[in-house]
Amino acid sequence: MKSILKPVAATVLAAAALAAASASFAQQAPKPEQLIKWRQSAYQVLAWNTGRVKANVDGTYNKDDVIKASNAIAAIANSGLGALYAPGTETGKGWRETTVKPELFTDKKAGEVAAAFNKEANELARVAAVGDVAQVKAQLAKLQGTCKACHDDFRKKD
Amino acid sequence: MKSILKPVAATVLAAAALAAASASFAQQAPKPEQLIKWRQSAYQVLAWNTGRVKANVDGTYNKDDVIKASNAIAAIANSGLGALYAPGTETGKGWRETTVKPELFTDKKAGEVAAAFNKEANELARVAAVGDVAQVKAQLAKLQGTCKACHDDFRKKD
């Protein structure tokens, strides 16, 4: 095949191959559907762990369990979830159709509720390590308040 | 209705109501389908974050991004994922049908691969904070080796 290629065409093909190799090396940017699936997953893991903390403060308290759950919540909060709201993810299907409202991508309040969530998540991890049940219960309520604030403004009803 | 209940029946009903109230107070144990959805979500969040670390070591390295991703991986590894494999979750649908093999619930090797995963995840978080790109890349490979070991033995092909 090579012998029938004109020099220009061969150059174009070589450039394309190089570009493809570079893209492969640096990895393709994840598709919007993948980002949506990841963020839906992240909130499920947050729900699992906030539920664990709640079960502990409402029932038999296991400090080690609360610490593990709170550390997972804080690490996910600190992970940079904003990257999962890249342009192109305003609509689309991850595990299911996204329930995000378009306002999340335009309203500056979104950044404020995200920052509040991070703050309270980190505080929960701190209190879990050093505090008593009542303090953890109070801090969990503060954290859940930030969840609700974001859901109220930026999440469509199921 | 109350007047037609015999004393014994009334006592049984009262006991049942009390048990229901207690269960509600301490929260119902999550259903198997919920546990499966949570574990599927946890692995998605792990995939997101290992992919981030890989993109960093293969492309432009951002230490802060690697630390955030590695801390999320370690916190999820340390969170106690074993609780998401409670009896009753051998089969069933979370986001989708589980791909877990029945051997995971009976083969003691499962505990060993889980421990190896935890060890390498914690080491990645440590190396991310203090190491260079080459060290992070080598540690990521070790971590991914533990992912593959578990998938090979305990996960059905998609």
Image: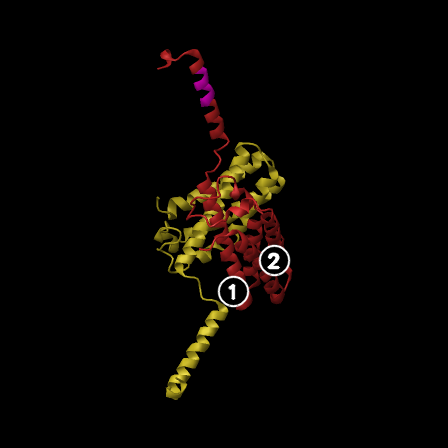
Chain colours: A yellow, B red
Q: Nearest the camera: A125 or A48?
A: A48
Compared with B136, B114 (above or below) is above
Going 41% across and 11% down the picture, which residue do you hit? B6
| B91 displayed left or right of A63 | left
B118 part of magenta stretch: no
CB within 8 Å, label 1 to label 2: no
Mark 1 to mark 2 CA distance (whole Å):
15 Å
Going 48% across and 29% down the picture, which residue do you hit? B23
**Segment tinted magenta in the rendering:** B10-17
Q: Which residue type does callout 2 highlight?
A: Leu
> At which x and y percent is residue A95?
40, 51
Tell me if I can see residue A50 in this picture.
Answer: yes
Disc nearer the start of the sequence (1/2): 1
> At which x and y percent is residue A120?
52, 45
Viewport quadrant of the C terminus of chain B:
bottom left
Q: Quadrant of residue A19?
A: bottom left
Going 59% across and 53% down the picture, which residue do you hit? B117
Tell me the SS state at disc 2: helix
Q: Nearest the camera: B27 or B146?
A: B146
Compared with A88, A19 (above or below) is below
Compared with A3, B153 (above or below) is above
Tag 2 subunit: B
Q: Quadrant of residue A10?
A: bottom left
> At which x and y percent is residue B145?
58, 59
Tell me the SS state at disc 1: helix
> At which x and y percent is residue A154?
38, 48
Give the labeled residue for mark 1. Answer: B55
Give the labeled residue for mark 2. Answer: B124
Tag 1 subunit: B
Viewport quadrant of the N terminus of chain B:
top left
B15 part of magenta stretch: yes
